[in-house]
Image (cartoon, helix red, strand yellow):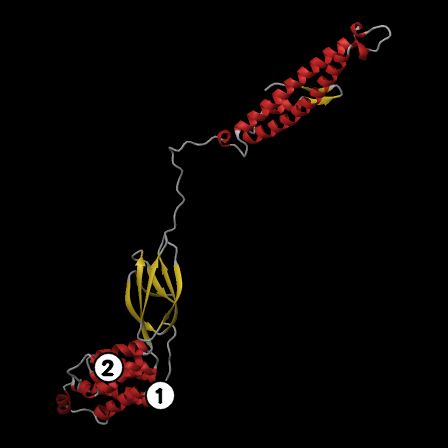
């Protein structure tokens, strides 16, 4: 686990503890009578005593890693020995193995009826308090159950994770499960505290397939930005203007014919004096033809654009505007729709 503090300095509590061990047990090898008086389950085998004594000598020489191997070998022969478990706790602490040291110390302190533990409880508790400053706990709850929980990449368990002991420090909490978006967040574990985190992984939603019962909308019904009624209105306006232009041109021709006929001739008089209404009527009809012709062109172009947006294939509207134009005599349009 990250953030281990591997200091070789021994705290006062462990120094006192080692002195108690050395003075109580290791100045001389314990006899069977002393073991009975202390009520401990110490193995009298020469192999065990040799391994323990070698571990002590290696620690005095500053070779803590080699001493740990010697104590672990001795543990294989008698894992219930109080003195051996205390030496293991002290050696793990010297190497910065705070979690392991805490496990051994808590196991020793649980032996409440052991005479050695009773006599040295104050020293053991000080050592446990010092080790506890480097240990905290992390608890993670949430959904979905079974999601993997990691601290700095190391697997902590699966949801929900009960309070789990870990070293004090800063971590990245990562929660993952197939089919869900992962969660990453920083967490800070304090001494003797419990960091409680709650996570909710969001499911990776799949794109839903279109319903087979939903009718498909035609492009003509939806349109492309121009409603149908506008297209019809512009087409109608263009047709109306075209009809007006045709009527105006017809009236103009009628007035022009009468104006040019002999009916408007009189000796000694001008045509304007003889047929003033024909002249005014022809001019008015011509003005109407110009205005309505221009309107026909404008409405026709608008209808073309509108029909093109609403229905891309609108050949009738295009054909209508293609034959519209303004001549010197007026506006002329032809076509069908």
Q: Is residue 249 above or below residue 225?
A: above
Residue located at (23% from left, 86% from top): 122
Q: Which mark is residue 244?
A: none
Residue 248 spot, x, y in % from top left: 68, 16
Residue in the foreground of this view, choosing between 305 and 109: 305
| Total number of numbered discs in the rendering | 2
Tell me the mark number nearer the camera, choosing from 1 and 2.
2
Q: Which mark is residue 62?
A: 1
Q: Is residue 207 above or below residue 105?
A: above
Residue 162 spot, x, y in % from top left: 27, 65
Tell me the residue that label 2 is attached to: 85
Left or right of 174 in this view: 307? right
Q: Secondary structure at mark 1?
A: loop
Quadrant containing the C terminus in the rendered view: top right
Residue in the foreground of this view, choosing between 238 and 310: 238
Q: Is residue 49 above or below residue 154?
A: below
Quarter of image, res 135:
bottom left
Crowd class of label 1 (few under 14; some 14 to 19; many from 20; radius 10 Å): few
């Amino acid at each position: 686990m990250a953030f281990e503090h591997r200091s070789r300095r021994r705290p006062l509590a462990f120094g006192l503890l080692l002195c108690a061990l050395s003075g109580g047990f290791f100045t001389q090898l314990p006899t069977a009578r002393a073991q009975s008086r202390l009520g401990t389950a110490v193995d009298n085998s020469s192999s065990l005593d040799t391994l323990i004594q070698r571990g002590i000598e290696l620690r005095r020489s500053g070779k803590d890693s080699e001493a740990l191997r010697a104590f672990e070998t001795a543990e294989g022969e008698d894992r219930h020995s109080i003195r051996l478990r205390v030496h293991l706790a002290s050696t793990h602490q010297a190497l910065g193995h705070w979690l392991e040291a805490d496990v051994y110390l808590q196991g020793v302190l649980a032996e409440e009826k052991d005479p050695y533990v009773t006599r040295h409880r104050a020293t053991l508790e000080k050592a446990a308090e010092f080790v506890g400053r480097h240990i905290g706990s992390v608890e993670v709850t949430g959904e979905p159950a079974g999601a993997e929980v990691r601290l700095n990449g190391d697997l902590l368990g699966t949801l929900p994770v009960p309070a789990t002991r870990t070293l004090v420090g800063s971590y990245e909490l990562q929660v993952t499960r197939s089919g869900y978006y992962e969660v990453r967040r920083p967490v800070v574990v304090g001494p003797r505290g419990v960091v409680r985190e709650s996570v909710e992984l969001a499911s990776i939603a799949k794109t839903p397939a279109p319903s087979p019962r939903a009718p498909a909308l035609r492009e003509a019904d939806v349109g492309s930005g121009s409603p149908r009624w506008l297209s019809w209105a512009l087409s109608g306006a263009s047709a109306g203007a075209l009809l007006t232009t045709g009527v105006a041109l017809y009236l103009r021709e009628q007035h022009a014919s009468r104006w040019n006929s002999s009916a408007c001739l009189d000796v000694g008089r001008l045509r304007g004096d003889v047929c003033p209404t024909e002249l005014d009527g022809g001019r008015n009809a011509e003005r109407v033809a110009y205005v309505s012709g221009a309107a026909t062109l404008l409405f026709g172009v608008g209808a073309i654009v509108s029909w093109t947006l609403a229905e891309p294939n609108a050949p009738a509207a295009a054909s209508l505007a293609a034959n519209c134009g303004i001549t010197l005599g007026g506006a002329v349009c032809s076509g069908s729709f």
